[in-house]
Amino acid sequence: MTTYSTRFVAAIALAIGIIVIASASILIRLAQSADVPSIVIAAVRLGISASVLSLIVAVKHAQFPVGVTPMQALLAVLSGVCLAVHFASWIQSLEYTSVASSAALVTTNPLWVGIAAWILFGERLNSWRVSGMVLTIAGSLAIALSDQQTQQGSNPLLGNFLAVMGAICGSAYFLLGRGLRNQLPLLHYIWMTYGSAAVVLLMAALATGHTELGYAPDVWLILLGLALGPQLIGHTTINFAMRHFSALLVTIAILGEPIGSALLAFALFEETIAPLQLAGFAGLLVGIAITAIGETKQHHEQHTA
C-alpha cells in the first residue's frame, strides 16, 4: 500500500478503536455496581487479554521473539507497568466521580504527550497542533468543572485526582509505545506490554487481599466484554495507528472517548449532561479536527520538502 493508503487504514482503525473504548467506562461501572473491586476489574481485563494474546503467540512461536532486543523487551515491560498504573488509578476514579468527568480527565494526555514528544522525540508543534491541544484541554477542563459544580459522584475531588494520575501514566504508556511501534511488530509489542501489565495488576490484587472470583455469569460476561472489546480491539487498533501517526494526534483523537462515554452514561445511568459539559464536548471535537488538520499539513510538508 502507498503511504497515504496506509494512513487511511490507520485512521479507520483509530476511529474504530475510539468507538469501542467509549464503552469501557460503562462496563466498568456495571462491574463495580456488582461489587467487583476496581483492582480486580483491571487485573481481569488485562489478564484475559494477555491470555488470548499468549495463545496467538504460541501458534506463531516460530516468529517470536525474533528480532527483539533486551532493551526493547525492557521498555515494553516498562510500558506495561505504566499501563497497569493507568488502569488501576482510572478505574478506581469511576467509584468517586461521574463517567463524563473521569473519561474527560483521563484523556488529557495531549497536554503531557505534546510536551514530552516535543522534548524527547523532537516532534514539532505547529500552530494548528498547538491550537488543537489548547482547545481539547479546555474542553476537558470544562467537563470536569461542570461535574464539580453539580457534585456528581461520592467524592469528585478524589475521583478527578485519580483520573489525572491515570492520564499521566497513560501518557508514558503512549510515548513508550510510540517509540517501540517503530521498531517492533504489533503482536510482539502488545503481548509483552499487556502481559506485564496483567502481572503487575494480578500481584496488586493479591497483595490487597482480593482473591475471590466467584462472580455471577452475567458479571463475567461484563468482564469478558471489557477485555475483548475496549482492551483487545480498542487498545490494539490504537497501537496499530500509533505507528502511522504522532503520539499527540492519537491521544487527541482519543479525546472523542468522553463524548461517547457521557452519552452512554446519560442513557444507562441517567447522568445528566449540563450546558458546560456540552460546551466542553464541542471544544473536544473542534480540537480534534484542528489537530488532525495540523498533523496532515505537517506530514505533507515533510514529504514534499
Image (cartoon, rainbow, N blue to C red):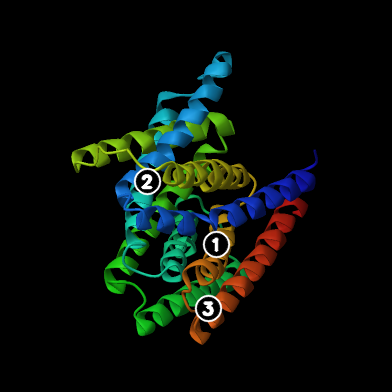
Looking at the picture, how far across and down is residue 266, in whole percent? 52, 72
Q: Amino acid at mark 1?
A: Glu
Question: Is the residue under label 3 in contact with that under label 2 (CB below 8 Å)?
Answer: no
Question: Is the residue under label 2 in contact with that under label 1 (CB below 8 Å)?
Answer: no
Against 189, residue 173 (above or below) is below
Q: Gap in Å between the C-alphas at discs 1 and 3?
A: 13 Å
Q: Residue at x 60, y 78 (%)?
A: 282
| Figure quadrant of the N terminus | top right
Q: Secondary structure at mark 2?
A: helix
Q: Is 276 on the left-hand or right-hand side of 9?
A: left
Against 80, residue 156 (above or below) is below
Q: Nearer the viewer, mark 1 or mark 2?
A: 2
Against 218, residue 211 (above or below) is above
Q: Quadrant of residue 214?
A: top left
Comes first in the chain, label 1 or label 2: 2
Looking at the picture, how far across and down is residue 192, in whole percent? 44, 31
Residue at label 1? 257
Q: Residue at x 40, y 45 (%)?
A: 83
Q: Amino acid at mark 3?
A: Gly
Q: Is 77 on the left-hand or right-hand side of 224?
A: left
Label disc, if present, on residue 42 of the rendered structure? 2
Q: Nearer the viewer, mark 2 or mark 3?
A: 2
| Figure quadrant of the C terminus | bottom right
Comes first in the chain, label 1 or label 3: 1
Q: Residue at x 37, y 34 (%)?
A: 196
